[in-house]
Image (cartoon, rainbow, N blue to C red):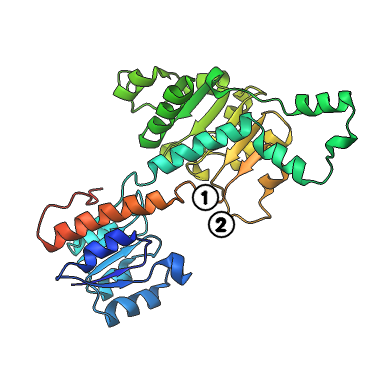
Amino acid sequence: MKILITAPFDESGLQVLRESRDLKILYENWRETGTIYLDEEELIEKLVSNNIDIFITEGDEVDTAVIEKSGLKLIGVTRGNPVNVDLAKAQKKNIPVIYTPFRNADAVADLTVAMMLSQVRKMTEIDRFLRSGNFDVSDLDDDGFANFFNRFIGLEVGGLTIGIIGFGQIGQRVAKRLYHGFGSNLLYFDPYIPNDHTVVLETKARQVTLEILMKESDLITIHTPPVEETEEMIDEKMFNLMKPTAYFFNLARSFCIDEDALYDALKNKRIAGAGLDVFDDEPVDSENRFLQFDNVTVMPHFGGNTKDVIRHQTNMIVTDVLNFINNRTLQYKWKG
């Protein structure tokens, strides 16, 4: 069988596939080629001309035409949800779709905590101030030096109440890091996670309504999926419930919040700051409107951008490619 891989793969996983006598590998990692996704005609031509049986991708759209005109026998997607595949058409043609659930859960949880630390210790604001060229410690008298320290005084994460909206795989990992690492007081809102869940008990998280979470939390982080019931669930009304000293963090999807309402809350200084990795308009560039705020840490949707995530997704895909060619049960098959 011939396999085309356009997703980033760990070299050790590639070597495992290369050692299989049943596979011929065509590896065109988008991080190396610079082509994040092929357009429909290019993709069909590449699949057909190379007689590809197995296609592993991250961003390429595997739509109806691609599935109809190619001879694919297996589709793999290195994402937490194969949203770029026409799943109904694949099912109709009996083409299994494998994916990589939670391959970036630890990476996103790590970045969430990093953003929290950045905000409560004012790291982004201090860094910008020092780089501005407007600060020379030799020009300060005693009062000026004291004012400098007072301006950037921070908080300890362990002494704060942190609200987690969405207590799934990422939310739970954030909770564990905050509870075991800092001893933070945790609130959570998730109607699908009962208060006797193992991680809830382990972290002593308290289940509350969304309104209570928004009112009582010092730091609020959202980790909900982009589904109908979460669309703009954090709107102007919810932002208005926040303490003026509270911070908001979004490493999920901008779909889940009213971005304009968040912008207004920051512009009018109704909240203390934010940490953002997702936006209505992506990819992010230097014109992003949130960059004007010194109290906002902005990242360009980099939550899962680690070498470890590439290793995780490689291991899962390699496992199921080998399962497929050896007629074994697929561990990461999408079931809808």
Q: Residue at x 43, y 67 (%)?
A: 30
Camera-side residue of 320 and 131 = 131
Q: Amino acid at mark 2?
A: Pro
Spot the residue most to the front: 138
Query: Which labelled disc corresponds to residue 283?
Result: 2
The percent coordinates of residue 146 (x first, y second) are 82, 24
Camera-side residue of 180 and 229 = 180
State the SS at label 1.
loop
Q: Residue at x 62, y 25 (%)?
A: 246
Camera-side residue of 322 and 243 = 322
Q: Is residue 86 visible?
A: no
Q: Which residue is mark 1?
A: 301
Q: Assign the N terminus to one quadrant of the image.
A: bottom left
Q: Amino acid at mark 1?
A: His
Does 102 sit left or right of 140 as displayed? left
Does 55 sit left or right of 285 as displayed? left
The percent coordinates of residue 21 (x first, y second) are 14, 71
CA neighbours of label 2 inside 10 A, class few (<14), some (14 to 19), many (20+): few
Q: Are marks 1 and 2 in contact (CB under 8 Å)?
A: yes
Query: Which labelled disc corresponds to residue 226?
Result: none
State the SS at label 2.
loop
Camera-side residue of 72 and 100 = 100
The percent coordinates of residue 233 (x first, y second) are 50, 34
Tell me how many marks there are. 2
Spot the residue most to the bottom: 49
Q: Residue at x 43, y 43 (%)?
A: 107
CA neighbours of label 1 inside 10 A, class few (<14), some (14 to 19), many (20+): some
Q: Judge whether 60 appears above or below 205 on screen.
A: below
Between disc 1 and disc 2, whose residue precedes? 2
Q: Residue at x 38, y 60 (%)?
A: 58
